[in-house]
Image (spheres, grey):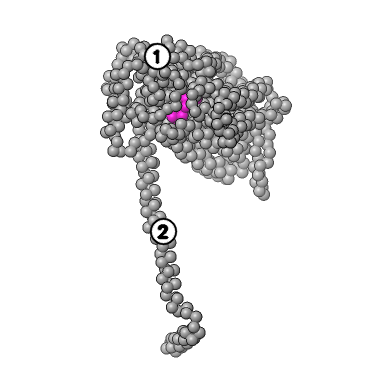
Amino acid sequence: MEVIYQYAWLIPVLPLFGAMLVGLGLISLNQVTNSLRQLNAIVIISLMGAAMALSFALLWSQVQGHPAYTHNLEWAAAGNFHLSMGYTVDHLTALMLVIVTTVALLVMVYTDGYMAHDPGYVRFYAYLSLFGSSMLGLVLSPNLVQIYIFWELVGMCSYLLVGFWYDRKSAADAAQKAFVTNRVGDFGLLLGILGLFWATGSFDFNIMGDRLAQLVETGSISNFLAVLFAILVFLGPVAKSAQFPLHVWLPDAMEGPTPISALIHAATMVAAGVFLVARMYPVFEHVPAAMTVIAFTGAFTAFLGATIAITQNDIKKGLAYSTISQLGYMVMAMGVGSYSAGLFHLMTHAYFKAMLFLGSGSVIHGMEGVVGHDPALAQDMRLMGGLRKYMPVTATTFLIGCLAISGIPPFAGFWSKDEILGQAFQANPFLWLVGWLTAGITAFYMFRMYFMTFEGKFRGTDDKIKQKLKKAATIVLELESEEPVPNYGPGAMKKGELAAHSHDTHDSHGHHSDSPHESPWTMTLPLAVLAVPSILIGLVGTPFANYFEHFIFPPTETLSEVLEKTAEFDPTEFYIMAGASVAISVVGISLAFLMYLQGKIDPAAIAAKIKPLYELSLNKWYFDDIYHRVFVLGLRRVARQVMEVDFRVVDGAVNLTGFFTLVSGEGLKYLENGRAQFYALIVFGAVLGLVIVFGVT
């Protein structure tokens, strides 16, 4: 064991210390702490930097072949029950630690520019540091109970950050939606944890997997129960990683500041779900029915997210649905048994999606000086265009991100997505077909986003477009005003949505100009740094020399088995599969080029011809509306009925008891008068009554 493993616990503790330090300062010396803005930022960033350095040291140690290390302390004991807490360092942990710390550090640097004029600047840094600490603690956890504790901490931090601008109703509602939706999945996860412990008597991942397989084999528990427990555990990742049907919270989470959007979507909250599936792989692998559910859930979610993204006009919402789609790819990979490919895509996606989100924040930052501080207008791509000449660094990095996510070689996304599609084809050609079509749609909507934002003529100063958008949205709002509508967040994603947010207040970044401007270096530097792994990091997982798979492989396999599999690589098969995936991506890019740059194909005309499908996509497959009517309005009705039962039955029973006591007391006071002669008369009457009764019988 290397000495450095003894200090791995410092990785989550360092950012936690920073969050505590700044948080206590805000509570006890608020004005002084807020006045030392830059100093607080430097402390938080430095502590995360130290955690990143330790993470890289652990990764390097694991790459060198040092064995995994687990440190446990007994936390609770009762009879035969023993619960340990501690930390574990293995290949998966080391990789995730590096991903989380690098993205978190760059997001923190970026935050200094993006939130420079926000009065909550210091508070935001404290939340960011706590969020990073929670995710790092989750990654290091050696058992399922400890994971669940940090799992809930991650959820709490996301609630604080999504609702950071809590004075905006839309942000407060989005935070509640994220919190409640995740509680649904987390309740399923808790039931699954308890079920697995009841069956196996352990919270350790490998022990649970082995014992569950033995119990099913011997018939000690039914296969149905094993499937049920596995799917209940999977409900946790379904919520955290925004998989169907609990995907609806993630687009609304865009209400938070853009840096947190990048952190949630790239390296922390949504990554936690895929990470847990990987950690629980020893359990899932022995339950084929659960693996099938996981695979098809991922495939459907990938397709669902992509089909909704093609009609989004808010740049952040488009990226949000893109994240849902890409997470679907990762979950599908896990379901078909492609453990390494799923985690490979998690790694590549973390870097290029963080870059894309931070790029969108840079665009919004530059647009606010032109269109004002209305978040709906600053994020609406219909008011952008031609930004490449104003924001060259942002445009270049955003283009790199689009190429990476579209799966164009040699960018990172090509290698990871192609490996998933190849594995899916071997497992189930239908899953491959869904993934392949989704790849084409992904390329289309990403380049639609790029062309609408960075190419063509700048439309931000066109008052006619602004008024047209506001007028159309206001009319629809007036028509819908009689019915309560669900909150969707800022942007013109749904008819009427733009006007709904036109009066929201937004914190000023302090920029006013007639044309967009490039962001400060604190924002462009993280973009440039993230562009490097977005281009190159995929090269560690090429099928010709798959170093990534040699390092990250299922815990139920040995390195020799993995080497045997990789040695069976068929170049012809790879070229056919890769050629098909690149071809569909090129088709998608070409369509976007003809529609949104050349103008040779009219998107409005196509939308009119397939209006039902267009409306389905625009309204997000109506999931928000359905959930609002069924769960929000429906549960309100149920609550009213429960209130009636409480008022009439429960309160009625209590009131009746009180009334009976009152009446009986009033009657008894005439009998209990304290005179002995009266009591003797009652006794004589009772005895006489008994004599008569028994005498007659």
Q: Nearer the viewer, residue 286 or 656?
A: 656
- Residue at image point 55% right, 21% down: 109
Give the secondary structure at mark 2.
helix
Residue 75 image point, x, y percent: 66, 42
Does 534 appear above or below 170? above
Residue 655 image point, x, y percent: 41, 62
The residue carrying mark 2 is 651
Does 283 appear above or below 379? below
Give the dominant element type of the magenta stretch: helix, strand or loop: helix
Number of residues whose C-alpha sits closer than 10 Å to that of mark 1, classed few (under 14), some (14–19) or many (20 or more): some
Residue 574 visible in image: no
- Residue at image point 45% right, 88% down: 688
Q: Residue furthest bottom?
A: 695
Mark 1 vs 2: CB contact within 8 A: no
Residue 40 quadrant:
top right
Find the magenta span and give its range: 253-259
Does 683 appear above or below 77? below
Could you tell me the amino acid type at mark 2?
Asp
Of labels 1 and 2, the one closer to you = 1
The residue carrying mark 1 is 515
Q: Nearer the viewer, residue 4 or 380?
A: 380
Residue 256 among magenta residues: yes
Could you tell me the amino acid type at mark 1?
Ser
Residue 214 quadrant:
top right
Residue 648 quadrant:
bottom left
**Which numbered circle lies on residue 77?**
none
Please identify the quadrant where the N terminus is shown: top right
Give the secondary structure at mark 1.
loop
- Residue at image point 65% right, 46% down: 81
Q: Nearer the viewer, residue 356 or 427?
A: 356
Residue 154 among magenta residues: no
